[in-house]
Amino acid sequence: MCSRHGVGLSHSRALTSPYPGSQVRRCPVPEDRLGWRVAWQDYEPVEYTAAAVLARPRWADPHISDKDFSPKFNERDGEVERKSLNGLYVVENGRPRNPAGRTGLTGRGLLGRWGPNHAADPVVTRWKRDGSGNKVAHPVTGKNILQFVAIKRKDCGEWAIPGGMVDPGEKISATLKREFGEEALNALEKSPEEKAELEKQLHKLFSQEHFVVYRGYVDDPRNTDNAWMETEAVNYHDETGETMDQLPLEAGDDAGAVKWVDITEKLKLYANHSYFLKLVTEKWGAHWSEGPAPE
């Protein structure tokens, strides 16, 4: 199965109001005014960039009007990737325009980069097994049940796939492994000896065959008219479960908790993460939905 790209961009969580971590309310955007091709002369979005972003941490761009800032949109800009996984985006009045449509808010909100902000989401899975080591099938569909490693995000309390931002110049493969180690295994707090053993086991897991689930725009509550999230979600499947048995889960970094979770359509997860898991179950022929209730 080939990976899915972010076409026909979903656009609902990007309208979350008030904006996450603030009391700032977005300008309401009716469904028939979402698209940029629809003329809206009276559109007056709220301008907002969080103080933490304006403080210029290493992961954030300067303000767009800074005289020393000349970003190269739609191309690689030094170590910063400003290309979108969804192709070319429009730059209007010096600002990139969200390809999914209006959000009711300009500026960058909580996001560091003008335009696409690239992340990576490692979907680590195994088969659910009983005490004898046999795969567990769903009683209704008869399909085997997949489990994935889920974290509870500290910023919003929602369960999610462990993942994070791609550092400037970093390869996606390195981001996937680093973020899983930091959030699901608490790698940052380990001793040098523990880190060495952890790295060995992570290399074993992340060097095996993998499946690119999705590449593209993410319908994220942090998105604005000028800054948005994009991700590459990659599935690393531990067929026997033996590799992950050597990696005890321990929440770290941005994760408040971590655990194995059965994959089902009933899960309520952060951003587009449920959709990513649906694609993974299709890949492995695993249980997803019980289907419509009988009449």
Image: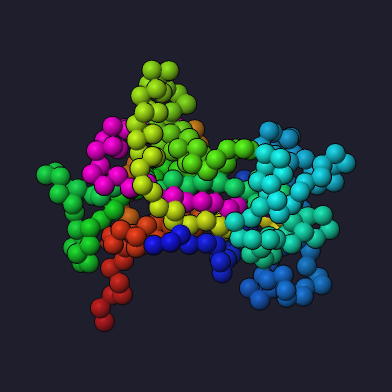
Q: Is residue 16 magenta?
A: no
Q: Identify the residue at the far left of this view.
A: 132
> Left or right of 292: which side holds 168?
right
Report if residue 136 is visible in the image. yes
The image shows residue 213 at horizontal and vertical percentages of 44, 56
Report if residue 16 is visible in the image. no
Q: Identify the residue at the far right of this view.
A: 67
Which residue is rendered at x = 52% and y = 56% of the image?
215
The image shows residue 85 at horizontal and vertical percentages of 59, 56
Q: Is residue 245 magenta?
A: yes
Q: Which of the 4 image quarters holds residue 98?
A: bottom right
Give the quadrant of the N terminus. Answer: bottom left
Range of magenta residues: 227-252
Where 250 falls versus 131 (above or below)? Answer: above
Which residue is rendered at x = 34% and y = 60% of the image?
283
Where 238 falls versus 12 (above or below)? Answer: above
> Left or right of 85: which side holds 175?
left
Which residue is rendered at x = 57% and y = 42% of the image?
165
Q: Which of the 4 image quarters holds residue 12?
A: bottom right
Give the quadrant of the C terminus. Answer: bottom left
Residue placed most toward the observer, 129 or 50? 129
The image shows residue 63 at horizontal and vertical percentages of 79, 43
The image shows residue 270 at horizontal and vertical percentages of 48, 53
**Count of numbered labels shown in the rendering:** 0
Residue placed most toward the observer, 216 or 272? 216
